Amino acid sequence: MLTHWAEIAGAEIAAIARPVSIGYGRGSFGATLTVLTTGANAPMLQMQEPRLREKVNAVYGYAAISRIRFTQTAPTGFSEGQAAFSPAPNPAPSAPDESAQRKAADLSGDVSDETLRNALSTLGALVLTKNKRRSEKPE
């Protein structure tokens, strides 16, 4: 649930909320999923609760979750609220250096399909540049 939350709930919900715990009541069927969100987003999530419960139960394959409880907190200040809900963006990849581009073009030169040859050349240049930078890093 925690590691695949964005796939289960969808990107929009995962950006504003995250699961905290799943608790089972005494002798009751179905569990309660506790979801952390900010105060401003809680009413919007509350309206989507039936749809979210269906998505979560679809992952389990049966009605494992019977109730969803939304916990509101500030985005900063408390232990649970300090982490951002959405992951940090990946840095933009740097362009391959010229020697890697030449070597990749030489290696893919025998491919007859021009589109495939260009794709392989680009991929090869990126891999060669990444490997070169990795080998140059001091450990």
Image (cartoon, rainbow, N blue to C red):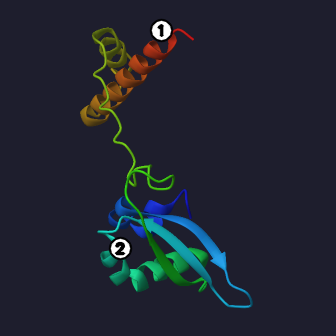
Q: Residue at x 51, y 60 (%)?
A: 4
What residue sits 42% from the left and 51% below the top?
A: 77
What is the three-letter code of the residue carrying label 2? Ala
Q: CA distance from mark 1 to mark 2?
A: 48 Å
Q: Nearer the viewer, residue 7 or 67?
A: 67
Residue at 31% of width from left, 35% of height from top?
A: 116
Q: Quadrant of residue 1?
A: bottom right
Q: Earlier in the sequence, mark 1 or mark 2?
A: 2
Q: Residue furthest bottom?
A: 28
Asked if residue 95 lies left or right of residue 126, the reply is left
- Residue placed most toward the observer, 60 or 75: 75
On screen, residue 60 versus residue 84, left or right, reads right
Residue 111's x, y, as percent?
34, 28
Pointer 2 residue: 42
Up/down of 91 relative to 11, above or below: above
Q: Whole-percent x and y of residue 67?
A: 53, 84
For disc 1, the marked residue is: 136
- Residue 127 visible from this viewpoint: yes
User: Which class describes the residues within 10 Å of circle 1: few (<14), some (14-19), or many (20+)?
Assistant: few
Secondary element at image label 2: helix
Vertical placement of residue 119 versus 137, above or below: below
* Quadrant hosting residue 39: bottom left
